[in-house]
Image: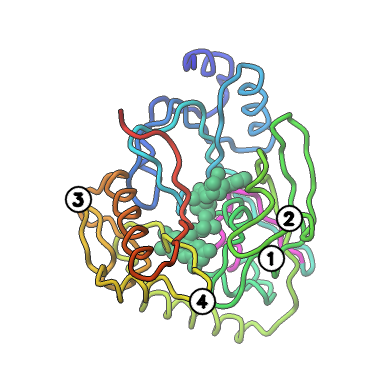
């Protein structure tokens, strides 16, 4: 792509050229992207998508980059990162959040208004857009349970609003995964509750998370989806893989479902270790582990 052209034609946008995505991903791995854009408004997002469509430039949207492995060769085209589009408001029992708002901040905005339903998400480090895309969930709750509707920008530049039913949520899945669309804003339907009870539950879940997860190291959370009838961490432990190091990556000694970056790991360390785990678990237990983390970009040539 012509990187100078996008800068010249969009002087008001915040664009970085050849920016290493390892500066942003939660795993601290990943190669450079041609153009990294930080739009501040919905109209700036549209401006970027229009430019990409008119100039045949591929684009990809990211939220907080907490569920990603960007390969070491990086990404060609434009990555639109929404972290600067992060307004949250509450109207009655509806919480309205822009796509780049942190899910954690959104749950605290609900707490401030004594609204219940969002407690489950108080420790999930994604953005609203990423959480809706993934149907993020924890401790018995998922986005589907509180989701009212979402405004999407489609790749042809039009806006579409989808309801809960239209999003066809299931375990770590939403209709968005089949579309070329960007979440701009989502609305969540909550219920009036008791402030102390909501806070108590959020504190309890935060303590559980801190006790069980290796939050002291970079990671992308659970690497694999839960296979039907099994627990991933248990399978990995029973296969004798827990603690295995691969380059700078390691299967966490605290939580076998996590791969942590302990010593300057590359994305290749991550993807090779993932492939190794999948092979061993298939061979030993005849279970096919599917990744929950999204692996994107190009391998280093
Ligand atoms: P990203 O990683 O930026 O992107 C993920 C996918 O969403 C990409 O395909 C991207 O293209 C798409 N996407 C992002 N924003 C948009 C948008 N605006 N419009 C359209 N598509 C978009 N997940 C859970 O479900 N439960 C947990 O308990 C949990 N715990 C975690 C703990 C840790 C320590 C870490 C590091 C991760 C954890 N995760 C968990 C994973 C992750 O936080 C969630 O999947 C989260 O929803 C991803 O959001 P994100 O903004 O970081 O998305």
Q: Element at badge 3?
A: loop
Sequence-wise first label, 2 or 3 = 2
Disc 4 versus disc 1: nearer the observer: 4
| Residue that appears at 77% across and 61% down | 148
Q: Quadrant of residue 49?
A: top right
Find disc 2 in the rendering and name its residue.
167
Disc 4 versus disc 2: nearer the observer: 4
Find disc 3 in the rendering and name its residue.
247
3D distance between C-alphas at marks 1 and 2: 9 Å
User: Which portion, as a residue range, is magenta?
Assistant: 94-108
Question: Is residue 217 on the magenta stretch?
Answer: no
Distance from mark 2 CB to nearest ligand 1 atom below 8 Å = no
Q: Dot 2: within a 10 Å radius of its alpha carbon, few (fewer than 14), some, or many (20 or more) residues?
A: many
Q: Element at badge 2?
A: loop
The number of discs equals 4
Distance from mark 3 CB to nearest ligand 1 atom below 8 Å = no
Task: Assess whether mark 2 and mark 1 are in contact (beta carbons under 8 angstroms).
Answer: yes
């Amino acid at each position: 792509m012509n990187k100078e052209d996008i800068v010249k034609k969009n002087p008001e946008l915040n664009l970085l050229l050849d920016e290493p995505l390892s500066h942003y991903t939660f795993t601290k791995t990943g190669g450079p992207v041609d153009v990294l854009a930080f739009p501040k408004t919905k109209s700036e997002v549209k401006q970027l998508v229009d430019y990409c469509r008119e100039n045949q430039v591929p684009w990809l949207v990211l939220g907080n980059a907490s569920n990603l492995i960007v390969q070491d060769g990086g990404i060609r085209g434009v990555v639109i990162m929404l972290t600067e589009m992060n307004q949250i408001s509450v109207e009655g029992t509806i919480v309205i959040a822009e796509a780049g708002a942190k899910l954690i901040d959104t749950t605290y905005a609900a707490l401030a208004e004594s609204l219940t339903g969002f407690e489950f998400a108080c420790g999930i480090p994604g953005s609203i857009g990423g959480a809706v895309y993934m149907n993020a969930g924890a401790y018995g709750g998922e986005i589907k349970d509180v989701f009212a509707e979402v405004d999407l920008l489609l790749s042809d530049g039009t806006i579409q609003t989808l309801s809960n039913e239209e999003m066809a949520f299931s375990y770590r899945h939403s209709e968005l995964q089949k579309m070329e669309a960007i979440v701009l804003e989502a609305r969540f339907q909550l219920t009036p509750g008791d402030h102390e009870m909501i806070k108590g539950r959020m504190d309890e879940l935060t303590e559980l998370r801190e006790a069980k997860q290796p939050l002291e190291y970079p990671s992308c959370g659970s690497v694999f989806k839960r296979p039907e009838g099994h627990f991933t961490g248990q399978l990995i432990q029973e296969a004798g893989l827990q603690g295995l190091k691969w380059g700078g990556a390691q299967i966490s000694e605290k939580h076998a479902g996590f791969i942590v970056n302990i010593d300057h790991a590359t994305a290749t360390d991550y993807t090779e270790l993932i492939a190794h785990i999948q092979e061993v678990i298939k061979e030993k237990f005849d279970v096919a582990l599917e990744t929950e983390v999204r692996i994107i970009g190009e391998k280093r040539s």
